[in-house]
Image: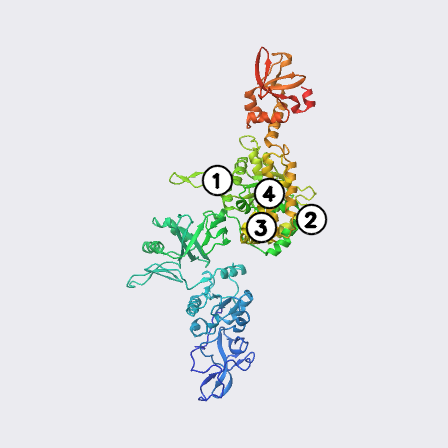
Amino acid sequence: MDDNSHIAPDPFAPLSPGGVGEDASTSAKPAEWLPIMPAPSDPPPKHRHAEHGIASSEWIYRGAGGAALFAICRFDLPGGGKVVLPLCYGTLRGRTRWHWKAAPTPRPLYGLDRLAARSNAPVLLVEGEKTADAAAVLFPDMVAMTWPGGAAATKQVDWSPLQERDVTIWPDCDKPGWDAATTIATLLSAGNAAPARIVAIPSAWPDAWDLADDLPAGASGDMLRDLLADARPAVRDAPVPAGFILRQDGVFAISTNNDPPPMRICGALSVEAVTDDGAGHNFGRLLEWRDLNGKRQEWAMPATMLAGDGTELRGRLLDRGLVIEPSRKQREALMRYLGCAAPAARVRVVSRLGWHVTSDGRIFVLPGGAIGAQGELRVMLQTDRPDAMPPLVTSGTLEAWKRDVAALCLGNSRAILSLSAAFAAPLLRLLDVEGGGIHLRGQSSTGKTTLLGLAGSVWGGGGPNGWVRRWRATDNGLEAVAAGHNDLLLCLDEISEASGETVAASAYQLANGGGKARASRDGGARKAAEWRLLFLSTGETSLAARLAETRGGPRRVMAGQEVRVLDMPADAGAGHGVFENLHGEVSGAGFQARMDRAYRRNYGTAGREYLTKLTADLTDLTATAREAVRAFIADHIPPDADGQVQRAGERFALLAAAGETATVLEIVPWKAGDAEAAAVRCFGDWRAGRDGGDGPAEDATALAQVRHFIGKHPARFEDADAGLGAQQVVNRAGYRKRVGGELVFCIFAETWQREVVAGLDPKAAAQALDRQGFLVRDGERLQKEHRVGASKRRFYTVLASIIGDHKADSL
């Protein structure tokens, strides 16, 4: 971008005919200009002009073989500005040499030699030789090219070398630049070339800015790459309803006799496809436009938005940067334009991430598209809660992630288990396995959050927290987050930040995969959110301890909650927090910091590669994973273990199978058996910390509650052996007496149900004590009859040894 620029008048004006490559001996009048291309040699460097002096810059146009064709020279003027002149070899007035003359039309492109040398590379077409050189540095994977003469000379160029090439045009940031780009795109299309794309420059950028200039304020190299990736074809194939025209500068309504002139109704808004949900509902239109920053926007507009006056529709479009003209007539024309559009293309729009079924099989839908065989039908994701969506973005390379993240997990059972959980989440639906979670409990600064970051790096990251979410939310908020993580891993940090009520509700909700039923605006039932996921949770306290801190008083952890959220120690027992193998670091803290740096630099690539390979061989890999789960259960779960232990073991089996699948697919640099060994170790640690061992958790809970009640309230049991009335008992719970030489507590049925085993099934609690040898039965009956005074009645009779023999002896 140059201020006070001056271009010599018509330096590329059409010339009298001269044969390209003609020899100087051609019979002609001495004054005729006869260009010779290619030239016998390159032009002299820093060529001197009689008026402007030495050229400040010179660009040589070369043919495909590298021979010089002609040159473009720039002269910087003393008072500011510039002069650009062509320099071509040929014969003029009988003198054969380099002359300040233009090449004949159609003129060749700048960079033909580079184009020929890179037959498969995409082409980036810019305006100006200086800009082309700058573009070659910025985008080395592309062939940067330009044409002679600038924006006004696009029709005097030989565009045929770009036939069938992948071409993107980066215009100067002004109207002449945009007009030149659209003209070139049209010329390429007319020549049956592949459709060219045009980069949309943000309108706020300086006038006449190009790639040779300094970046505008707030811009970055990443932004340039995003603009390039977002370039779209200028010659559109989208049908336009009768009465409208679609141009690069907007949509216009036209009258039948074109009087008055076309009326602009909005920016360049195209209707790309008809959308639906694949079940015959939720029809709409796929709209595409450029926002005020030049960024491409895409939105599946529900057809229901056309039913009213369009206020909500316009609001959505305005919010996403489309310019809409304000008058009522223009607004009504916009509604007609969208309502009458009938493109032939069809797109299926889904509202959740994860697995979907098409006629070609299963696909996995991500925000940027679907992975798997979706055939000709495009499937796209669109959600009303983008804030709940996980950061499914990538950074670094898969090889870097394998080297710096996955490889350092070797020898660390918790780290391997965490990565395996990330790979296991998509297998839930394939294997028809229920969702659930694992809660990693331990002291602060032991590396628990690092485990979440490692696991999340399989799928994405970035930002202050990367993939990790916080427990600090309402259960309704977590419902939206869970729906956004469907078929993926959810990482929740620090359970103490959530209320006990939220934790209690979420333990079931997250694992069961269903949100609350709610009423719609018309009073009908609104479809509840659904999902299936695995989640990792961390905290300094256990699930049981968190529930004990509810506002309504302590709440008991139900066995169903415990099996849905498996509570296991985060500390691996090696003195380094969650880690066992420090891979050369001198401390657990140092290794943790190393891991944190690694997963914050490299993320998102492993999950995409995993899904790509998984969908490519879905049937066989699913069968292999199912067999691995079965083998783990057979090898590592005791056959006589309680059903809750069985269910917990199945989750560890799933994680082992997923880690082994990722190993086979070479997503992780582990050996066969590493993931299974980590799952076996962690399953053993979970069992070791579980109340009741391999038996039912309810048995341990019942035993604990009865032991606690008797130990806390011995004075509420009247001594029946001392004679009734011998002592004053307040709020009597029952009696204590000796039966066959053993001290027992006879508990009233009402007290048993309301206080002793509150929250449990009273009969099941009695059966639990019976199985553990602490209940005195009466044949098949759980309550035993005792004579107390002059009457007989039945009690739940518990041996005093339940509180410990030494304590029982002191009563």
Among the two numbered marks 4 and 3 on one chain, the one whose residue lies closer to the N terminus = 3
Q: Residues within 10 Å of mark 4 (few under 14, many from 20)?
A: some
Q: CA distance from mark 1 to mark 3?
A: 26 Å
Contact flag, marks 4 and 3 (Cβ < 8 Å): no
In the image, which disc is placed on residue 515?
Answer: 1
Q: CA distance from mark 4 to mark 3?
A: 25 Å
In the image, which disc is placed on residue 582?
Answer: 2
Q: Amino acid at mark 2?
A: Leu
| Front one among 652 and 203 | 652
Q: Residues within 10 Å of mark 1 (few under 14, many from 20)?
A: many
Q: Is residue 748 left or right of residue 352?
A: right
Q: Classify mark 3: helix, strand or loop.
A: loop
Label 4: which residue? 630
Label 3: which residue? 458
Q: Amino acid at mark 1?
A: Gly
Image location (x, y in percent) of residue 449: 61, 45
Q: CA distance from mark 2 to mark 4?
A: 33 Å
Q: Reply above or below: 344 against 183.
A: above
Quadrant for the C terminus, please: top right
Q: Residues within 10 Å of mark 3 (few under 14, many from 20)?
A: many
